[in-house]
Image (cartoon, helix red, strand yellow):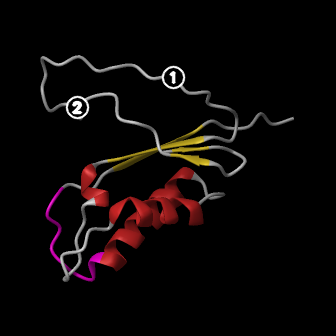
Amino acid sequence: VHLSGSGHITRLKATGAALGIDPARDAQAMRIRFEPGDKLILVTDGVTEAMNAAKEEFGEQRFVAAVERGLREPPGDLVSRLFAAVDAFAQGEEQSDDIGCLTIERKRRET
């Protein structure tokens, strides 16, 4: 997800298979404009596929909602908020996949 400094969220499109699945497969490049104040949030599928006792997945909608609530937070706090949202949703159900997140922020220039 690309989160602009103004608060606009864009779900980036996949350009191929997940990284690391097939070492012989080349990754496709993608370009986006990354302005000061923008964040890039990368997650593993274990985030959106986390399940609760009713076997419902956390899903894209809950993921985006958690990111929206952390709109103005520093990257570390946004990751903590996302993991807390996944944990609350799972309600103690055993984790069935890896859950990873990397958040990068382009800092604004200080004047």
In the image, what residue occupies the spot 26% across and 68% down? Answer: 57
Judge the density around disc 1: few (<14), some (14-19), many (≥20) Cα neighbours within 10 Å: few
- 100 and 65: which is toward the camera: 65
Name of the residue lying farthest toward the right = 111
Q: Is residue 4 above or below residue 76?
A: above
**Magenta span:** 90-97
Q: Could you say where residue 38 lies in the image, as x and y percent from the top left? A: 63, 40
Type of secondary structure dominating the magenta stretch: loop
Is 92 in the magenta? Answer: yes
- Frontmost residue, 92 versus 28: 28
Task: Classify residue 6 as left or right of residue 92.
Answer: right
Q: Earlier in the sequence, mark 2 or mark 1?
A: 2
Residue type pointed to by label 1: Arg
What number is the disc on residue 17?
2
Residue at 28% x, 21% y is 27
Q: Which label belongs to residue 31?
A: 1
**Residue 52 falls inside the magenta stretch:** no
Residue at the image position 66 percent from the left and 57 percent from the top: 72
Q: Secondary structure at mark 2?
A: loop
Question: Which amino acid type is shown beneath numbered disc 2?
Answer: Ala
